[in-house]
Image (cartoon, rainbow, N blue to C red):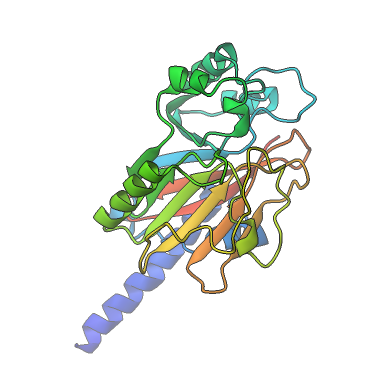
Amino acid sequence: MSKRKLLSIFLLIVISGFLYQFEISIHLVESNENNNCLNSFSIKPNLINNRVKSNEYLIIGHAYGNHSGSNKGISDKVLKYFESLDKKNNIILTGDFVRSGSKEDLLLVKKQVESYFKTGMFAVGNHEIKTNQNNYYDVFENDLFMISENKVDLVVANFSTINWLPKISDQNKINAFINSSENEIIVLFSHQIFWENMTNKTPKKNGPDLLETELTENMLDWLNIGNKKLIIISGDYGLNSDEIFCEQSNEGNILFIANGIYENDNDKLIRLNNYDSGFYFEEVNLP
């Protein structure tokens, strides 16, 4: 390879890095411990002609807020934040987005999501099915969502079962989806923090609801990711901590994240910024 080509490649790398940092600064993404951890596997968007923003996702766990509130659907605090958004994007609710699980409450959340977002995806929580699990399916129909973005695959699944794992048929669908994709990064969304025995630090989950079996030290033995990297974002969180939990596995190929709101002063949601040539996460403080 000629020196001129080597120099051109070097300049492209430098410019790409600069533009990535410029993008970060535009979105006011602080270089802090949380954002650095959240972006352990992120792919920097490329040069400006390949940096078309395709989709943006807001990720919120325990969206109905604290246990003592009177709201039936999404927290008033969260709805107020939705009203401040200048355009419709997409939302992923990682469980417990209604208080009672009644059909009336679920219909309310569906209406709220449709009012502010282009699409909504839902990781079923215990509150959605505690009254009658048929209510959830009558309103939302699906509890498994799988989307391939340009550089990352998104899987939103129902872990609110007696063993905190998706049903076998969904496991098979997820594996088939992953195996058919050329993307090297997978983001798996759940409500339950089913992976709590797989991290060095213990995430302060909200509770053990629905669980009737012992959690193992490898709750991912059903998932065939091969040489790909996996990011797990779980939403049954916020009651005992208002700081995002983020830890990389000892093997370096899995990133464990837990985050939910509880109407505290330090409540946060996570935004996934997706481009044609890359993606990154950022924590967003709820005012």
At x 49% / y 56%, what residue is drawn?
231
Q: Residue at x 46, y 18 (%)?
A: 139
**Residue 53 figure quarter:** top left
Q: Residue 104: x percent and y percent?
A: 57, 11
Outermost residue on the front side: it is 213
61 or 58: nearer the viewer: 61
Considering the image in quadrants, where does the C terminus appear? top right
- The image quadrant where one finds the N terminus is bottom left
Residue at the farthest left position: 1
Any part of residue 157 in sight: yes
Q: Is 196 left or right of 12, judged from the image as shown?
A: right
Q: Is residue 13 above or below residue 271?
A: below
At which x and y percent is residue 203? 70, 55
Where does the image place residue 286, in percent across and percent down from the top left? Answer: 68, 37
Q: Is residue 194 above or below residue 11?
A: above
**Is 194 on the left-hand or right-hand side of 144?**
right
20, above or below 101, in the image: below
**In front here: 23 or 82?**
82
Q: Quadrant of residue 145?
A: top left
What residue is shown at x 63% (from left), y 53% (from top)?
214
Which quadrant of the figure has residue 82?
top right
How far from the left and from the top, in percent, is residue 121?
45, 33
With 74 as the anchor, is 16 left or right in this view?
left
From the viewer's perspective, is 151 left or right of 106? left
226, 233: nearer the viewer: 226
Q: What is the number of callouts on the image?
A: 0
* 82 vs 137, nearest the viewer: 137
Kindly identify the residue that appears in the image at 72 percent across and 50 percent down: 243
Query: From where the camera sits, is residue 52 visible?
Result: no
